[in-house]
Image (spheres, helix red, strand yellow):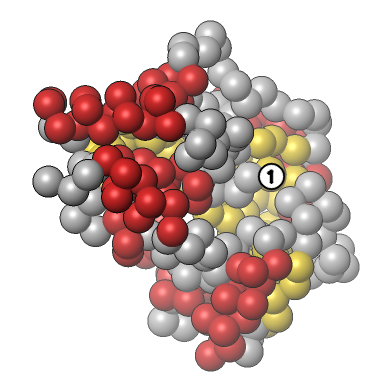
Amino acid sequence: MPRFEDLVAEGAAVPTEGWDFSWFTGRATEQRPSWGYAKSLAGRMAAAGAALDIQTGGGEVLATVPIAPPILAATESWQPNVEIARRNLAKFDASVVEVGDTAALPFPPDHFDLVVSRHPVVTRWDEIQRVLRPNGTYLSQQVGSGSVRELTEFMTGPRPGSAHPPVGPAATTAGVSPLAATSVAEAAGLEVVDLRQEALRMEFYDVAAVVHFLRKVIWIVPDFTVDGYIGRLAELHDFIERHGPFVAYSRRFLIEARKR
């Protein structure tokens, strides 16, 4: 059985760039939503003339589509991911632009017939409405409120209510409820035509997986550092050794909106 110190060091050493989660194979699992975002994305991209992927990460999901539209653009806020996305999306001759999560989109009005985003940190509904063509579609798989709350509470203690309320009429943050997202989208001038939500079982098989996950998905414990949480990590390591995998639930919702 690996020592606690070795597992923590291993989890702390894994690079966090991009959204490739293959390192977790054999160390953690997460159920996938029944709606199949990647499959839906592939179908929409094949039919689009001009498309935009917001907060693309390293472009890993977008790169899986078999057919890309003639005009394809992507935005990303973290500079190391921008370079990864440019490499991954070069086969589509896609334009990848570094844009802050809360910033306006650097594209003209009525420019895209499809805008997509998987797990955006912030959703600028007003900007999505602006860059969509009339009858254009926004498709997004988002993080629901209370996602992985079991791990957050183990590390930091119970937190009442949602930690991620809406931030205004033009935006929502990661962790908002589907109802709140719908309200903000409609206030921005979009019509929500599909909305689905699910809770998905996650299992962490060792503390290295937890360390890497918290470093990579920073909104679960925003102030996480190994040194700052070493005591709780030791308790979690002991829990897993005695009781088996630590179980949490991610909350996801799929929202599809159309520009009126």
**Which residue extends farthest top?**
160
> Where residue 152 appears, x then y in whole percent?
45, 26
Q: Residue at x 50, y 47 (%)?
A: 215
Residue drawn at 79 percent across, 47 percent down: 102
Q: Which residue is nearer to you in this view: 115 or 60?
A: 60
Q: Is residue 55 above or below residue 172?
A: below
- Residue 54, compared with residue 252, is above or below; it is below
Q: Is residue 1 above or below residue 110?
A: above
In front here: 19 or 194? 19
Looking at the image, residue 163 sits to the left or right of residue 28; the answer is right
Q: Percent from the top left, x then y, of residue 208?
A: 32, 47
20 sits to left or right of 28: right
Mark 1, other Cα within 10 Å: few <14 / some 14–19 / many ≥20:
many
**Residue holding disc 1:** 123
Q: Residue 48 falls in which quadrant of the image?
A: bottom right
Residue 114 located left or right of residue 102: left
Q: Is residue 237 left or right of residue 151?
A: left
Q: Quadrant of residue 211?
A: top left
**Percent from the top left, x then y, of residue 137?**
62, 57
Q: Mark 1 belongs to which amino acid?
A: Thr
Q: Nearer the viewer, residue 245 or 50?
A: 245
